[in-house]
Image (spheres, rainbow, N blue to C red):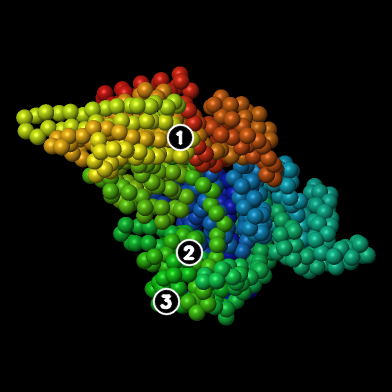
């Protein structure tokens, strides 16, 4: 398979809300390009792009799948991205790897939440896009209402290139406003069509929309605007030239329409992709940094430039090994070559280069700019890394992914599997960089964090399928702490034990006082005289530290406490490190119980991003969760609510926020500080802790 000329290459992501028909559109595209001999159906689990068992079972895309095709002498690399918010990080990463996007909007329900988020990411990255209004054959399909949605919600002026002929069951084709011709499609999924005159009943509307299209194109180009004002019209070639320039510069967003499942309008969409979306050569040079100096560096999207690429996806398989998926930015890459991973300063040996057609791997000898391809069994490389020529090193920084927002405790079915679960989850994290994993030192739980409950459910399913490991997911324990509110001077504890032979004796005198919140712990030795030999001081401090691990109130760690060890007593024969350690531990617990102990809870900084109409409900809900709203700010069309909320109240916030905002809200949180638990709630927590200890 010959390497395509850079100007003949298109790399395109299909993006949009879950269920808008991206995978069905990919099927129709591959069929029309004669890559496949029949169109698969998502409902039947036989599509090229949805091949993971979890995707087939859930009937939706859970990760980005890649394909490639040739259309009228152009090579198109295609990325079919997920539309579910739980898996949207894959969409974000795919958009880093393409030169253009097709935003799929369904004609029935119009612009949805993830449509907005996908479009926002496109805008942030400066990616030129087309809009494809899909499902024109469905009941309640409404092209013009969808157009209004696109204008109002996405805040763009769409340039309509096609109008539907009929809607719902009477949908039979599209009118091309550029050529002023009507294309009537067969409804047998073949993609075949005949061309004729514009239907008379649409003539007036078609003329109106064509004039609007010409105006929009002229407005985006000063030269064309001048000609249009002078002559009142533009030729088809001029309109097309203006369209291309406007799309590539992100000034214009063309709109086309059709039905993916009926394969209506798809071949014309393919024409739009190759005519209007940019090649790598039409995109600006990619900016990176020289690893050693941090200086800015640019790479031209040319086959003759030094090789560079970045990794935007990793697939792991316990049997086949790891598959690293990358986008070539510059230069030419050949099979069986050595490349430099500039992110990790290591060399990697490349074997066979692979183009992906869903799960099928097609070997190729070389790759140029714009190619999205894969290589197997790289040892060190991870998602987000840069690969390049060692003689011309560069590092590309990908935009940060959204942070994990929900956490569950992972409990292996058998204790022997605990280490295996940790290592297997680490491998899944190579595949999915939005998964986070850590062991909570305080609660001793394995905590898995992700983008939502579905995200973690799928991770657990993969754990079972790929590594034969079964785990339970539980709500994580809240890492409470204990502290004191008042000072207690002169706390004395004597440890004395006589058992026939050598006994145990130690006495310690402490002053215990509170420290400012967040200070942790301070141990001060103020001994005078020789009542306690100084060699026992480390044992005393160790006894205090061990006692702090499990406080006397409910067994939670003690913090923000100062212990002053100022006196004690010892015995020449019976005193030992162990005796002083025990005495110190018991003295500390006694002192804490006498110094007004209280329970502390983690307080989170929370940012909730919602459309303005949900702001009142969300603020009311946060107040109901003992939250304190700190302020609000605008972020585009959204409002950002900043608040501090106790962790225990926001553990399972994700499904509640989704329900409250019809899926249009999102949030992030991070630890702010610890604060005192209100007494009536503290009592419940203490009782629960004691009950669990009793059960244990």
Category of crowding for the residue at label 2, using alpha-carbon neighbours closer than 10 angstroms: few (below 14), some (14–19), many (at least 20): many
Residue labelled with disc 2:
385
Check whether the beta carbons of the residues at disc 3 and disc 2 lie within 8 A of each other.
Answer: no
Q: In this view, does 618 lie above or below 300?
A: above
Task: Determine which residue is flagged by label 1.
Answer: 515
Q: Where is residue 289 in the image (x, y as percent from the top left)?
A: 57, 68
**What residue is shown at x 25% (from left), y 35% (from top)?**
531
**Disc 3/disc 1 C-alpha distance (Å):** 57 Å
Q: Is mark 1 on a helix, strand or loop?
A: loop
The answer to which of marks 3 and 2 sits earlier in the sequence is 3
Between 72 and 159, the one lying in front of the other is 159
Q: Which residue lies furthest to the right in this view?
A: 230
**Is residue 101 among what the camera can see?**
yes
Q: In this view, does 695 lie to the left or right of 148?
A: left
Circle 3 is placed at which residue position?
A: 338
Q: Distance between the residues labelled 3 and 2?
A: 16 Å
- Quadrant where the C terminus is found in the figure: top left
The answer to whether any part of residue 270 appears in the image is no
Residue furthest left in the image:
500
Q: Which residue is at 52% across, 70% downward?
A: 291
């Amino acid at each position: 398979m010959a390497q395509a000329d850079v100007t003949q290459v298109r790399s395109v992501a299909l993006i949009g809300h879950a269920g808008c028909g991206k995978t069905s559109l990919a099927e129709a595209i591959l069929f029309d390009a004669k890559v496949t001999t029949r169109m698969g159906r998502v409902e039947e689990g036989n599509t090229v792009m949805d091949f993971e068992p979890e995707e087939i079972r859930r009937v939706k895309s859970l990760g980005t799948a890649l394909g490639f095709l040739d259309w009228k002498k152009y090579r198109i690399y295609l990325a079919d991205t997920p539309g579910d918010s739980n898996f949207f990080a894959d969409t974000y990463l795919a958009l880093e790897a393409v030169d253009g996007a097709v935003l799929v909007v369904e004609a029935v329900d119009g612009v949805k939440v993830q449509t907005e988020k996908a479009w926002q990411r496109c805008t942030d990255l400066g990616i030129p896009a087309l809009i494809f209004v899909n499902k024109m054959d469905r009941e309640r399909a409404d092209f013009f209402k969808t157009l209004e949605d696109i204008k109002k919600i996405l805040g763009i002026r769409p340039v309509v290139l096609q109008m539907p002929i009929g809607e719902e069951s009477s949908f039979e084709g599209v009118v091309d406003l550029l050529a002023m011709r009507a294309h009537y499609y067969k409804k047998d999924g073949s993609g075949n069509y005949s061309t004729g005159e514009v239907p008379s009943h649409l003539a007036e509307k078609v003329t109106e929309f064509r004039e609007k299209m010409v105006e929009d194109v002229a407005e985006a180009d000063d030269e064309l605007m001048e000609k249009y004002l002078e002559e009142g019209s533009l030729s088809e070639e001029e309109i097309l030239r203006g369209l291309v320039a406007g799309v590539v510069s992100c000034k214009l967003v063309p709109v086309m329409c059709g039905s993916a499942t009926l394969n209506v309008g798809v071949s014309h969409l393919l024409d739009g992709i190759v005519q209007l979306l940019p090649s790598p050569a039409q995109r600006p040079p990619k900016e990176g940094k020289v690893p050693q100096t941090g200086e800015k560096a640019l790479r031209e999207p040319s086959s003759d430039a030094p090789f560079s690429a970045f990794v935007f996806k990793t697939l792991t398989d316990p049997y086949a090994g790891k598959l690293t998926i990358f986008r070539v930015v510059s230069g030419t890459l050949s099979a069986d070559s050595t490349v430099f991973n500039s992110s990790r300063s290591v060399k990697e040996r490349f074997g066979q280069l692979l183009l992906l057609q869903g799960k099928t791997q097609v070997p190729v000898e070389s790759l140029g700019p714009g190619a999205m391809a894969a290589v197997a069994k790289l040892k060190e490389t991870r998602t987000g890394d840069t690969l390049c020529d060692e003689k011309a090193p560069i590092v590309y920084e990908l935009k940060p992914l959204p942070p994990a927002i929900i956490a569950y405790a992972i409990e292996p079915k058998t204790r022997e599997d605990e280490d295996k679960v940790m290592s297997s989850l680490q491998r899944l994290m190579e595949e999915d960089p939005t998964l986070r994993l850590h062991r909570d030192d305080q609660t001793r739980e394995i905590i898995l964090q992700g983008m939502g409950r579905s995200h973690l459910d799928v991770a657990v399913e993969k754990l079972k399928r790929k590594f034969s490991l079964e785990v339970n997911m539980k709500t994580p324990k809240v890492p409470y702490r204990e502290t004191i509110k008042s000072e207690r001077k002169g706390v004395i504890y004597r440890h004395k034990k006589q058992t026939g032979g050598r006994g145990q004796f130690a006495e310690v005198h402490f002053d215990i006082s509170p420290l400012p919140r967040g200070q942790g712990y301070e141990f001060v030795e103020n001994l005078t005289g020789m009542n306690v030999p100084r060699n026992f001081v480390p044992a005393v401090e160790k006894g205090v530290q061990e006692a702090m691990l499990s406080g006397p109130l409910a067994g939670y760690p003690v913090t923000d406490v100062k212990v002053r060890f100022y006196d004690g007593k010892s015995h020449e024969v019976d005193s030992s490190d162990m005796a002083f350690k025990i005495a110190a531990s018991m003295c500390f617990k006694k002192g804490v119980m006498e110094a007004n102990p209280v329970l502390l809870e983690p307080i989170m900084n929370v940012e909730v991003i919602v459309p303005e109409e949900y702001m009142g409900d969300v603020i009311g809900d946060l107040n109901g969760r003992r939250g304190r709203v700190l302020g609000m700010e605008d972020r585009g069309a959204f409002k950002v609510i900043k608040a501090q909320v106790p962790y225990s109240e926001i553990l399972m916030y994700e499904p509640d926020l989704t329900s409250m905002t019809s899926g249009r809200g999102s949030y992030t949180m991070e630890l702010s500080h610890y604060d005192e638990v209100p007494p009536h709630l503290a009592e419940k927590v203490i009782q629960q802790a004691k009950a669990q200890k009793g059960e244990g």
